[in-house]
Image (cartoon, helix red, strand yellow):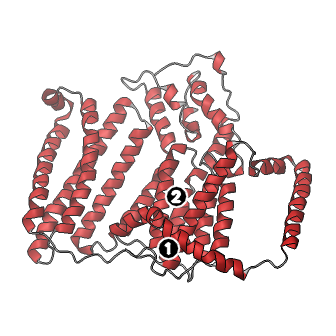
């Protein structure tokens, strides 16, 4: 692995300026809550800086990937469900790393994920070599004059800023949001953001300019057929036995399940979902490893691969269908939660990945498989955000309550009140006093002023929806439990 291929290369002055500007911009733009349009603006600044400070023009593939990254980071700008951010930011970071290294395989994708760790020291050395040259090229001949210009600029900003703030309350609020409070945690937060984003931008510039390369992959020596066919074939037999059992349970219905397992159909669905979820993930890993070790140089080998590994993928798709059916029954019986909705969406994504594996193994090839999986992942993330999980959780539970679903005469208002403002419209369908119990905390959350960088469309919509809705004070109503 060549992490610093040209030890004489150095960061240009343009790189140093771009990194500094982006770090300062991110410190201003990224809100403490990690929710709002500021995230997308900061990430866009990083991408623009990286492409600006590197030679050559980005290709259409790089541009489309960058658009996908910005779309992912824009989710906190139109969804107020903050629990999505810890999933979406790592996805954006890994995708950005893949964009920088030009990842085209799983191996290069892994390298992109760990590049901030393995490339940090080479990037710092590269920057260190560039600082003296940049300083020499831009030596200040009159330092006292420079200090005077700086003080004059600060004075003008203070005077005009104070006058504008006194003339307009909105502008005064904006200045208050942009100005860190000395002694408050906000200062530390802005410094940390500036450091992290600055290092991230520096790594991107280093990768695109220095082109660190992975060592060439050694020539693949396929193993003997039985070494991969026996274990994967055995798993396929287990799959077929399981699917046969599933078919009997599916067609036999609740009576058959109660006779054979002693469980109701809903309890039966709940008892096996997580195992099927794990089986799907393990199958993808098994197929990937089996494909790597199989000998596909002969017609007989290719047929065997397609029969066994293709059979595993098809069987796994059937398991995905079973898991989706179980979760649907599960939510009909017990209601929806964030976890259940999320795992349901993950199953759909795993099913799409299995289909991609099937298509690749059918003869299309695996050359672009990593990119296809990346596109599927970004598409699934955006589709999940568009699906509006918090609103769907509220809708399903409110529908069950209003329909008087068997076993659901009551509703867990405590859980629903902890949802984000995304769920406001659905919760407003509840009758009083349940409505006030469900939306009281959400209304307070939506009306909290987070500044312009923390603005998101869902929160703004919730405020407008609640404007004409009377909410009974907490001391005026007793909220029922689940």
Q: Is residue 133 above or below residue 79?
A: below
User: Mark 2 highlights which residue?
Assistant: 72
Which of these two is toward me, 75 or 204? Answer: 204
Q: Is residue 194 above or below residue 431?
A: below
- Where residue 471 appears, as percent x and y from the top left, is 66, 26
Q: Which mark is residue 148?
A: none
- Where residue 461 appears, as percent x and y from the top left, is 64, 44
Which of these two is toward me, 448 or 293? Answer: 293
Quarter holding residue 292: bottom left
* Quarter the N terminus occupies: bottom left
Which of these two is toward me, 297 or 7? Answer: 7
User: Considering the numbered disc 2 on the image, is that residue within a helix, a strand or a loop?
Assistant: helix
User: Mark 1 highlights which residue?
Assistant: 207
> Callout 1 environment at 10 Å: few (<14), some (14 to 19), or many (20+)?
many
* Quarter the C terminus occupies: top left
Q: CA distance from mark 2 to mark 1?
A: 22 Å
> Callout 2 environment at 10 Å: few (<14), some (14 to 19), or many (20+)?
many
């Amino acid at each position: 692995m060549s992490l610093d291929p040209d030890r004489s290369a150095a960061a240009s002055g343009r790189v140093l300026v771009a990194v500094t500007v982006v770090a300062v911009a991110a410190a201003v733009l990224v809100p403490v809550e990690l929710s709002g349009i500021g995230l997308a603006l900061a990430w866009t600044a990083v991408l623009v800086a990286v492409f600006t400070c590197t030679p050559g023009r980005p290709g259409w593939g790089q541009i489309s990937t960058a658009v996908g990254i910005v779309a992912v980071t824009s989710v906190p700008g139109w969804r107020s469900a903050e629990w999505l951010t810890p999933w979406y930011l790592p996805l954006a970071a890994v995708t950005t790393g893949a964009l920088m290294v030009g990842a085209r395989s799983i191996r290069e994708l892994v390298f992109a994920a760990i590049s901030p760790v393995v490339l940090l020291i080479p990037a710092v050395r590269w920057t260190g070599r560039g600082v003296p040259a940049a300083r020499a090229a831009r030596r200040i001949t009159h330092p006292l004059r420079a200090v005077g210009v700086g003080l004059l600029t600060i004075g003008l900003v203070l005077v005009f800023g104070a006058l504008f703030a006194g003339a307009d309350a909105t502008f005064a609020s904006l200045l208050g949001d942009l100005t860190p409070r000395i002694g408050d945690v906000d200062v530390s937060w802005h410094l940390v953001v500036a450091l992290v984003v600055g290092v991230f931008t520096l790594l991107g510039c280093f990768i695109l300019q220095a082109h660190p390369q992975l060592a060439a992959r050694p020539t693949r020596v396929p193993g003997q057929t039985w070494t991969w066919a026996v274990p994967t074939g055995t798993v396929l037999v287990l799959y077929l036995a399981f699917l046969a059992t599933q078919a009997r349970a599916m067609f036999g219905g609740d009576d058959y399940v109660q006779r054979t397992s002693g469980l109701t159909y809903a309890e039966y669905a709940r008892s096996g979902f997580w195992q099927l979820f794990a089986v799907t993930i393990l199958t993808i890993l098994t197929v990937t490893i089996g494909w790597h070790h199989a000998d596909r140089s002969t017609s007989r080998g290719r047929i065997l691969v397609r029969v066994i590994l293709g059979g595993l993928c098809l069987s796994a798709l059937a398991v995905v269908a079973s898991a989706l059916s179980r979760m649907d029954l599960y939510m009909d019986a017990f209601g929806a939660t964030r976890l259940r909705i999320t795992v349901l969406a993950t199953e759909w994504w795993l099913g799409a990945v299995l289909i991609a594996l099937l298509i690749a193994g059918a003869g299309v090839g695996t050359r672009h498989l990593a990119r296809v999986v990346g596109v599927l992942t970004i598409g699934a993330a955006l589709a999940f955000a568009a699906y509006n999980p918090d609103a769907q959780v509220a809708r399903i539970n409110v529908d069950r309550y209003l329909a008087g679903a068997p076993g659901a005469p009551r509703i867990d208002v405590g859980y629903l009140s902890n949802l984000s403002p995304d769920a406001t419209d659905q919760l407003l369908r509840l009758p009083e006093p349940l409505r006030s119990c469900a939306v009281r905390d959400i209304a307070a959350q939506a009306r909290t002023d987070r500044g312009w960088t923390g603005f998101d469309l869902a929160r703004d919509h919730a405020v407008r929806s609640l404007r004409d809705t009377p909410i009974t004070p907490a001391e005026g109503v007793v909220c029922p439990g689940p």
